[in-house]
Amino acid sequence: MRAVAAYDDAIALYRVLVEQEHRQELRNDLARALYNLALAREKQKALPAALEAAREARRLWEALVNEGMKHLEKDLADAKELEARLAKRS
């Protein structure tokens, strides 16, 4: 699936920017790419990989919301819902 490959490439790039270059303003973009990867993996029925991506997205959004970025609360709620759904199916 080309979407999964594209998300993997985006995640790899965002990881470098966030973790090595300390571009903290890109954490939301990393979370979004992880969330989208989780959805794509769910469609492929690759549930363990989907759950791992959903958990990481949720953790990132949780941290951002806790830092005061309240506009990301819906994203956090969506990630929690996806994570719970995947956990039940895994």
Image (cartoon, rainbow, N blue to C red):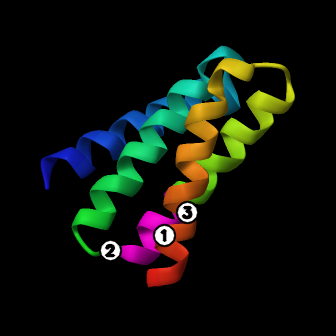
What amino acid is found at the position of numbered circle 3 in the picture? Answer: Glu
Secondary structure beneath dot 1 equals: helix
Q: Are marks 3 and 1 in contact (CB under 8 Å)?
A: yes
The answer to which of marks 2 and 1 sits earlier in the sequence is 2
Depth check, mark 3 against mark 2: the one in front is 3
Q: Which residues are magenta?
A: 47-53
- Residue at coordinates 75% horizontally, 29% vertically from top-left? 64
The spot of residue 27 in percent (x, y) is: 63, 27
Q: Is residue 65 above or below residue 34?
A: above
- Looking at the image, the residue that sits furthest to the right is 67
- As drawn, the label of residue 85 is 1
What amino acid is found at the position of numbered circle 1 in the picture? Answer: Arg
Q: CA distance from mark 3 to mark 2?
A: 13 Å
Report crowding for label 2: few under 14, some 14 to 19, many 20 or more residues within 10 A (C-alpha). some
The spot of residue 60 in percent (x, y) is: 68, 40
Q: Main secondary structure of the magenta part?
A: helix
The spot of residue 69 in percent (x, y) is: 75, 19
Q: Is residue 55 left or right of residue 37?
A: right
- As drawn, the label of residue 83 is 3
- Looking at the image, the residue that sits furthest to the left is 1
